[in-house]
Structures are given as structure tokens and as C-alpha cells.
Amino acid sequence: MSNAEVLGRFVWHELLTTDTAAAAAFYPKVLPWRTAPSSMPGYTIWMAGQTQIGGLMALPAEAGATPPHWLVYVGTPNVDATCSQAQGLGARIVKAPADIPNVGRFAVLTDPQGATFALFTPGAGPPPGAPPAQGGFSWHELATTDVAAALRFYGQLFGWTKGPGHDMGAMGVYQIFQHGGDQVGGIVNVQGPSTAPSWLSYVNVAEASRAVAAAKAGGGRLLHGPMEVPGGSWIAMMMDPQGGAFAVQEAPRAASQKPAAALKTAAAAKPPAAPKPATAPATPAAAKPATPAATVAKVAVAAKVAKVVVAAKVAKTARKAAKKAKKAARKVRRAGRKVARKVRRAGRKTARKAARPGVRRAARKAARKTARRVRRSARGAARGVRRAARRVRRAARRRR
């Protein structure tokens, strides 16, 4: 593939993390990957079959508090010229253009809205292998603060064109973008003011639910899914044990169906620091066409609404049970006080009838002792009711 043909293609994916050994053990359990050494110390290659698809390295010291994240590399015939163009469009240079001996030239930038990405110009070397059927990256999703502005920026920089846009209500428009006529990704509004703009990449797997189970067993966290999307694909968004966000996509189970990638944004990876690929990135062929994400978003919103409704019903039931328990406790306390008063009155009456002062004193003492026992019994019963109420509330919270 010539340098001219590489423009706008996602050519490399790199994980920067706080524990490279743990990441190297985690991902091959979840994805059809294996690791391979590279010519650069501290840099590991992700392999899908015989194809190099990405790299693994430790977060640089200058990254500061930046959490683990995946960084996407987009191809360009000239890194320096594209950097200058990007700066003119409002981007910021994070890592100035630099050469990787016998590999190529790269740079790291943040787009005008703050999402971090990298540029890469391949050097002279063997052509990349064919993209793997399993383990390759199939979809790329940008969460940003301005969908229209992001589409203009990347369109001018890489020639990406506007595809279908789908209104997802309060979540905004999910905007598909195309490269060479193929739908390769989507752009969506960030969900919540505390979420930073970022890229999320999806990996093809044989079975999404199996990947989710392996991720959970390995200490990862499920963010969303697995769920079926239009066209028959299944998707799930996850986070590795160190905090790097990624997603998986399972192809339609019916061979006659066309693959679909109606994808919904997940937890955003944070802005990355300056990385380096250790070997020539493998440039995949054009990503498979994807169907829009409107239906997926509606399903996700409906699921969240249903969850909220169920939680509200559980909470209401718990509140009613607690209220009844409190009412029962009050009744028990009142009954205990009433009995104690009756016992005291009976004791005083008996004492008054007694002929001798000593008998009266003994009667009063017995009455007081009996009254104390009754009060203690009433308090104990009330405590038991309160404990039962607390157990009901705890059970309700666990159900939520």
C-alpha cells in the first residue's frame, strides 16, 4: 500500500498502561490475540494470527496523572504536513513529529475538542498482511463535545466524509463517518460534563458474551452489553483492570446477514501521552460497513429507563416495609408502657390495702420490678422489629 493510499486509515492501536505485564496477561484471555517482542526495549506487539495490529507500552513518566488508555494511529503520507494542517485547524501538538528507525514517522495530537490521536507515515518495509477475520479492529467511535465541528476537522485532515446521522434524543446525533465510501466509525456527544473527549475502538471476536465472561474473570469491568444491534451483530463495552476502555463486536450469527456495527459510545478513554509503535503498523483493509446506531441507542435508553423503574419500585416497597416496621415498633412500645402502668397501679393498690408498712414496701418493690421487666421486654421487641426493618432496607438496596 502506497503512502497516498494510507491517508485516513486506522493503521495502528496502542495501549499505554500502568502495568504492562498484567495487560499482556489479560487481553489474550479476552481477545484472540497473543504478544510478541519488538526491537524496542519495553515495547510489546499485539498479534492477531500472523498480523501485527498494535502495541503495548508503559505510560511515560511525563504523562502525570493520565490514566491507562488506547491510542489510535491514523495514516498520512506526510506527518509533518498533516501536523501543520491540523494546527491551522485548531489542533494541539502533544508529541512533535519524530522518526522510528526502520518503521516510519509519527506524531501525537489533540483535536480542537480535546480527543487525542496519533499520525503515522509508514517507512519502507514489507507490505502489511491481510486483516485477520478475528482480532482485528472493526469500528472506531469518537466521543466529543461538538459532533459537527469534529466531523469538519477530521474531514479536512483525512478526507473522511459525512454518512448518515441519527437522532438519539437527549444523547444527540450519532454521526456516521465514511472513508473511501465505507462506513468506518461514528461520532457522538460525550455523555456527562465529567467525560473527556476520546476515541474508542472495537475488536472483532467470535462471541461477545465469551469475551465479557473472560474479561470479568480476569478482573475487567463490563460497561455496557452484550447487546444485539441491527443486522445481528453483538457488542459490549469493557474496561481492563488498569482502566483502559475497549469494546468488542461479534459478527452476525446468521451467515446470510451482513455485518452491522451500530455502536453506542461507552466509557471514554482519557487523553493519552506520547507513544511510539515499535514496528511498522499493520494497515487493515477498509472496515466493514456499519448500520446506524439510532436503534441501539433507543434500546440502551429503554433498558436504562426500565432499570430505573424497577429500582424505584424496589425502593418504594422497602420504604413501605420500613414504615410498617416502625409503626409496629411504636405499638409494641405503647403496649409495654400501658402494661407497666397497670402493674404499677395494681402494686400501689395492693400496698395501700396492706396493714403493715413493710408489706406495702414489699408490694411497691415487686410492682416496680415487674414494671421494669415489662418495659425491658417491650424495648427488646421494638429492637427486634427495627432490626427486621433494617434487613428489609438492605435487601432492597442489594436488589437495586
Image (cartoon, helix red, strand yellow):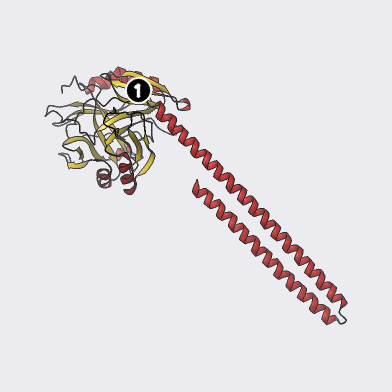
The kind of residue tagged 1 is Ile
**Residue 131: image location, x then y, percent:** 20, 31
In the displayed structure, 322 sits above or below 82; it is below
Give how far across and how far down residue 196 sits, in percent: 40, 32
Q: Is residue 72 above or below residue 315?
A: above
Q: Quadrant of the N terminus?
A: top left
63 sits to left or right of 120: right
Which residue is more in the foreground, 248 or 125?
A: 248
Q: Quadrant location of residue 258? A: top left
Does the image show residue 127? yes
User: Callout 1: helix, strand or loop?
Assistant: strand
Position of residue 60 measured from the top left corner of the image (x, y, whole percent): 28, 39
Q: Which residue is mark 1?
A: 176
Residue at 53% x, 52% y is 394
Residue 277: percent from left, percent from top: 21, 34
Describe residue 302's horizontal placement relative to residue 67 as left or right: right
Please rate how many residues cluster around mark 1, counting C-alpha atoms within 10 Å: few if below 14, some from 14 to 19, many from 20.
many
Residue 241 in view in this figure: no
Number of numbered discs present? 1
In the rendered image, which quarter is residue 70 located in?
top left
Figure check: 375 above or below 351: above
Q: In percent of the image, x 45 and y 27: which residue is there?
A: 171
Q: Nearer the viewer, residue 300 or 14?
A: 300
From the viewer's perspective, is 396 left or right of 246?
right
**Residue at image location 59% in from the left, 58% down from the top:** 387
Q: Which residue is at the front of the view, 171 or 154?
A: 171
Q: Left of 356 or right of it: where is 313? A: left
